[in-house]
Image (cartoon, rainbow, N blue to C red):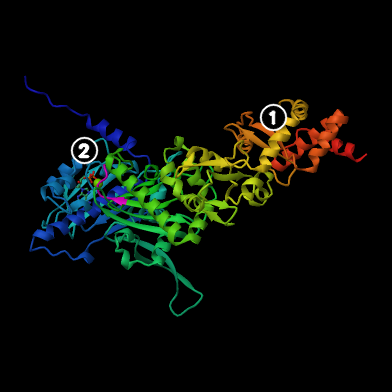
C-alpha cells in the first residue's frame, strides 16, 4: 500500500509556533539579527573557496531602523541575500533551515559560527508585527524580490528593486492593545537594550541611527539635535580573546558592564576548554555578598551563550548550590538547544560543562587558600557559610569535595585554620578534634567547659555559626580523627589524679547528687561530679547526639520543633561551693534545694540559654542576701 504523507495545517502550525514557542517577545530581534549574521557569514565562507569573491569585513554590517511615523522596524543586512527560490523555500516552508543546509553542504569544519538550525526563528517576527515584508537580492544576481506575509494567510512573492545584495526585513509593528504595548519596539533605548542583551557579541556591527544633542557650532550653550550612526554591539566577546591580551581591568569592566554585582570581583577565572567538551567561560567570585544572597529571591546560575548569542540569563544547572555565589558566563558551540533556543535539552554536554566548571572553581579556591590566604579569608567571610551548608546538605554527599575548603577559628592560633592544619599539629596522644560552640569567640573563650581541654594544651575549634556543628556531625571525621565537643560526656582524655578524686567524691556523695537531681526533676538527666571543670563551680554538658547548641538552633527555627538535648549538670567538687552543698545536705535540705536551683540557672546563663523563670531566679538570689 502506498504510504500517505502527513499533512500539516500550516496556518494552525504557524499560529501555534508564533504563540507558544517563545516565552519572551523581545526574542524576535535576536532571531532576525542572528539570521542577518548568518547571511554575512555565508559570504565569508563562500569567499574561502571562491577566488572571485573577496571578503572585506568592513563592508558588512546589520542595520536596525525604527520608524515611528510609519510604525515600521527594519532589519537590514549586507549578507548573501535570497533568490526567488530561496525565499520560497526558506521563508515559505516552516522548519526548513537554509542555514543548516548550508552548513551541511559546505561541510564547514569551523562552520559552528552559523547560528541557524531549526528553521523557525524567522516567524518570531509575527509576535510583534502584523505584516512582514522581506526584500532580498541574492549575491551575484541583479534581481530582487519582495516576499510579504501577514502570518497565517500565506505569502506573496513579487519582483522588486534593491540596489545592493542583501536583505531588508520590514516589520509593521502591531498596534498597542489594552494588555500589550508594542510601541516599545520602535523606541531607540529599548532596541538598544535588547541588542545589548542578546546580540552584543555578534561579530558584525549592528548599527542604528541615534539622536544626540550636541553643542551648536560656535556656541557653548546652544544645543542642537543631531543624528549619528552608532554601532551598538561590542562584537568581540572578551572570552574569545587570548588571556595574555587581557588585563585585570578588562575583567573588572566586564563584571561591571554585565552587572554581575555592584562590587568588584575578588577573583576571576577565564576558561578555554577544548577537550571532551568545548566551551569558554569567565567566572567571578564577588568581593561582597549580594544583599539578597541568603533570601529565596537569590537565583544562582551562569549566563549561557551559544555561539555568542545569549540563550539563558541564569542557567542554574551550571553551578552546584555550594558554589551559588559564582557569577559569570559560559559560551559553548555544542549545546543541544531546544527549538526556541531559550532552553537546553538536558544533555550530556551541559552536565560535562557543569562538572568541569565545578572542578575549576574548586581548584581556584584551593589555590587561593594556599597562595593568597588573606584573600581566601575575605572570601570565606562572605561565603564560607555556603560551603558549610554544602557539607551538610544532601546527606553529606559533597562533604569530601568541600572539607578542605573549610576554616574555623582556633583557640591557639587565634585565627582561622583549616582542618588539615589542625590535624597536622595534634600531639600524638590527642584522640579527637575538639570544638566548642557559642555565639561569639569572646563567649566561647569564657566557657567553663573548655577548661580541661585547654589545660591539656589541646587546640579547640570555635564554632560560632549555626550551621557549624550540623556540618561537622555530617563530616563525622577528618583524616580518621573524630570531632568531639568540649561539652560532650566523654572527652577521651586519660583519667588523672584529679579525675580519680572526682570519682571518689561522687560515690561518696551519691545521695547528695541524687537529691539535687530530684530538685531539678526532668530539667536535667543527671547531676554529677565534673572532670572537666578547673576553676568554675558549675556547667552544663550533654549526653547523646543532640548538643545544647544544636537544641538552640533547632528551637530558633520558624517551624521549630520542641527538641531538647539530654543535659547533665556538672559540679566542680574542688570548688568551695561543693563544701557548702555538702554542709547544706547535712543540715538544711531547703537550702540545698535553693543552691541547686541557683547553680542550674547559672549554668543556663553561661550556656546562653534562657532562664525559665527569671523572677524566681532573682528572688532566690535575694534569699541569699537576707
Ligand atoms: P534558521 O535560522 O534556524 O535556519 P529561520 O526561520 O530563522 O531558521 O530562517 C530560515 C531560513 O531563512 C534561514 O535558514 C536562511 O536560509 C533564510 N534566511 C532568513 N533570514 C535571512 C537573511 N536575512 N538573509 C538570508 N537568508 C535568510
Ligand atoms: Mg534563524
- Judge by depth and name the residue closer to the eye, 126 or 244: 244
Q: Are marks 2 and 1 in contact (CB under 8 Å)?
A: no
Q: CA distance from mark 2 to mark 1?
A: 80 Å
> Magenta includes 84?
no
Residue 300 seen anywhere in this rendered image of the structure: no
Determine which residue is flagged by label 2.
94
Determine which residue is flagged by label 1.
526
- Rendered-image quadrant of the N terminus: top left
Label 1 element class: strand
The answer to whether 607 appears left or right of 51 in the picture is right
Label 2 element class: loop
Q: Position of residue 30 (x, y in %)?
A: 32, 49
The answer to whether 547 appears left or right of 195 in the picture is right
In which image quadrant can residue 371 be found? bottom left
In which image quadrant can residue 543 be found? top right
Q: Position of residue 219 (x, y in %)?
A: 48, 78
Q: Which mark is residue 183?
A: none
- Judge by depth and name the residue closer to the eye, 210 or 110: 110
> Which of label 2 and label 1 is nearer to you?
1
Which residue occupies the extreme right position in the image?
Answer: 626
Does residue 378 sit above or below 398 in this rendering? below
Amino acid at each position: 500500500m502506498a504510504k500517505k504523507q502527513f499533512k500539516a495545517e500550516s496556518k494552525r502550525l504557524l499560529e501555534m509556533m508564533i504563540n507558544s514557542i517563545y516565552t519572551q517577545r523581545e526574542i524576535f530581534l535576536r532571531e532576525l539579527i542572528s539570521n542577518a549574521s548568518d547571511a554575512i557569514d555565508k559570504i565569508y565562507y563562500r569567499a574561502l573557496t571562491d577566488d572571485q569573491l573577496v571578503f572585506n569585513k568592513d563592508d558588512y554590517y546589520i542595520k536596525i531602523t525604527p520608524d515611528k511615523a510609519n510604525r515600521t522596524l527594519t532589519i537590514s543586512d549586507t549578507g548573501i541575500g535570497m533568490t526567488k527560490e530561496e525565499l520560497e523555500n526558506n521563508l515559505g516552508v516552516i522548519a526548513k533551515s537554509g542555514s543548516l543546509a548550508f552548513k551541511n553542504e559546505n561541510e564547514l569544519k569551523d562552520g559552528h559560527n552559523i547560528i541557524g538550525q531549526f528553521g523557525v526563528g524567522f516567524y518570531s517576527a509575527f509576535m510583534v508585527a502584523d505584516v512582514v515584508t522581506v526584500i532580498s537580492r541574492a549575491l551575484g544576481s541583479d534581481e530582487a524580490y519582495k516576499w510579504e506575509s501577514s502570518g497565517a494567510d500565506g505569502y506573496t512573492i513579487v519582483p522588486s528593486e534593491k540596489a545592493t545584495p542583501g536583505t531588508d526585513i520590514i516589520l509593521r509593528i502591531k498596534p498597542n492593545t489594552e494588555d500589550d504595548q508594542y510601541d516599545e519596539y520602535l523606541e531607540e533605548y529599548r532596541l538598544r537594550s535588547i541588542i545589548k542583551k542578546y546580540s552584543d557579541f555578534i561579530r558584525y556591527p549592528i548599527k542604528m541611527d541615534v539622536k544626540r544633542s550636541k553643542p551648536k557650532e560656535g556656541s557653548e550653550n546652544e544645543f542642537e539635535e543631531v543624528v549619528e550612526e552608532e554601532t551598538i554591539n561590542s562584537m568581540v566577546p572578551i572570552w574569545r580573546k587570548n588571556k595574555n591580551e587581557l588585563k585585570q581591568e578588562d575583567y573588572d569592566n566586564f563584571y561591571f558592564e554585565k552587572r554581575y554585582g555592584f562590587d568588584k570581583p575578588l577573583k576571576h577565572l577565564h576558561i578555554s576548554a577544548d577537550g571532551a567538551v568545548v566551551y569558554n567561560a569567565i567566572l567571578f567570585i564577588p568581593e561582597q555578598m549580594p544583599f539578597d544572597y541568603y533570601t529565596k529571591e537569590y537565583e544562582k546560575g551562569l549566563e549561557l551563550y551559544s555561539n555568542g548569542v545569549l540563550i539563558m540569563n541564569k542557567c542554574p544547572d551550571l553551578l552546584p548550590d555550594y558554589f551559588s555565589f559564582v557569577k559569570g558566563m559560559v559560551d559553548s558551540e555544542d549545546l543541544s538547544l531546544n527549538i526556541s533556543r531559550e532552553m537546553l535539552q538536558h544533555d550530556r554536554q551541559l552536565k560535562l560543562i557543569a562538572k568541569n566548571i565545578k572542578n575549576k572553581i574548586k581548584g581556584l579556591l584551593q589555590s587561593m587558600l594556599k597562595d593568597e590566604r588573606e584573600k581566601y579569608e575575605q572570601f570565606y567571610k562572605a561565603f564560607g557559610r555556603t560551603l558549610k551548608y554544602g557539607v551538610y546538605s544532601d546527606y553529606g554527599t559533597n562533604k569530601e569535595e568541600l572539607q578542605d575548603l573549610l576554616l574555623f577559628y582556633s583557640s591557639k592560633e587565634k585565627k582561622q585554620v583549616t582542618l588539615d592544619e589542625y590535624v597536622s599539629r595534634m600531639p600524638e596522644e590527642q584522640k579527637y578534634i575538639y570544638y566548642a560552640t557559642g555565639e561569639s569567640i569572646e563567649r566561647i573563650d569564657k566557657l567553663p567547659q573548655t577548661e580541661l581541654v585547654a589545660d591539656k594544651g589541646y587546640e579547640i575549634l570555635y564554632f560560632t555559626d549555626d550551621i557549624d556543628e550540623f556540618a561537622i556531625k555530617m563530616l563525622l571525621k577528618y583524616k580518621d580523627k573524630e570531632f568531639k565537643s568540649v561539652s560532650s560526656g566523654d572527652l577521651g582524655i586519660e583519667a588523672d589524679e584529679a579525675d580519680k578524686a572526682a570519682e571518689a567524691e561522687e560515690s561518696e556523695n551519691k545521695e547528695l547528687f541524687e537529691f539535687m537531681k530530684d530538685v531539678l526533676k526532668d530539667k536535667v538527666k543527671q547531676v554529677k561530679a565534673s572532670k572537666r571543670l578547673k576553676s568554675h563551680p558549675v556547667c552544663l554538658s550533654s549526653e547523646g547526639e543532640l548538643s545544647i547548641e544544636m537544641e538552640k538552633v533547632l528551637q530558633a527555627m520558624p517551624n521549630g520543633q520542641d527538641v531538647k538535648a539530654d543535659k547533665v549538670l556538672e559540679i566542680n567538687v574542688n570548688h568551695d561551693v561543693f563544701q557548702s552543698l555538702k554542709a547544706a545536705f547535712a543540715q538544711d535540705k531547703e537550702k540545698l534545694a535553693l543552691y541547686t536551683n541557683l547553680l542550674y540557672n547559672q549554668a543556663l546563663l553561661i550556656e546562653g540559654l534562657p532562664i525559665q523563670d527569671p523572677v524566681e531566679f532573682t528572688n532566690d538570689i535575694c534569699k541569699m542576701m537576707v
